[in-house]
Amino acid sequence: NLKYHEKKLLKKVNLDEWKKTNTTREQLVTSKYLLKTRDEYQKYNRIVGMIRKLSESIARLADNDGTKEFVVTVSSICQRRLPMVMVSKKMMPNFQNADQFVQQGHVKLGNRIVNDTSMLISRGMKEFVLWADHSKIRKKIEEFNHEYDDYNYI
């Protein structure tokens, strides 16, 4: 607990922005993809830097004009997160609800229930993102599609 004078001092300080870093892009990506901490963004940014460095060195090794250059950004990595994959598969209408249902344990990857919203899903694993077996959401979807079977929920 902060004392009164400490709270008054902190009102004038913006802890989200630093003068030496460009945080506008960081704040935009953090709010758009619901990243929990600044460290998560920085971790993805480091991964992007490593991928770019590797792709540049591969391009130098190949030294062909036919090499295809691809751009990797933090946003492209964030789009591989589990809630975004759910939105792209049309399992959920928006990212916020998808994030909430993942945290509540309504989603499984293969046969494992996943609670981690920052899990990155490859293109091959995208087909294995499903509703959990005993999820009420799955039950409602099956009832709506007339595919509900009581035997699955015993």
Image (cartoon, helix red, strand yellow):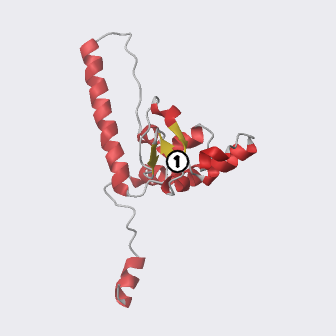
Q: Residue furthest bottom?
A: 4
Question: In x, y percent, where is residue 96?
Answer: 57, 54
Q: 131 and 148: which one is in front? A: 148
Answer with left or right where residue 61 lies relative to residue 152: left
Q: Secondary structure at mark 1?
A: strand
Q: Residue at the spot x=42%, y=57% of the render?
A: 36
Q: Position of residue 88 (x, y in %)?
A: 58, 38
Rendered residue at 34%/61% (across/down): 18
* Residue 143 is at least partly visible in this image: yes
From the viewer's side, name the closer residue of 20 and 5: 5
* Residue plotted at (42% across, 48% down): 118
Percent of width and height locating residue 92: 62, 46
Reading the image, the residue beneath label 1 is 107
* Residue 93 makes an appearance in the image: no
Figure label count: 1
| Quarter that holds the N terminus | bottom left
Residue 27, quarter of picture: bottom left
Say above or below: 1 vs 144.
below
Q: On the image, which quarter does residue 121 sit in?
A: top left
Q: Nearer the viewer, residue 151 or 46?
A: 151
In the displayed structure image, the side of residue 120 where residue 57 appears, left or right: left
Q: Badge 1: few (under 14), some or many (20 or more) residues near its Cα, within 10 Å? A: many
Q: Nearer the viewer, residue 91 or 34?
A: 91
The percent position of residue 60, horizontal first and vertical second, equals 26, 17
Residue at the image point whose x is 25% and y is 23% from the top: 57
Location of residue 58 with respect to 31 vertically, above or below: above
Q: Amino acid at mark 1?
A: Val
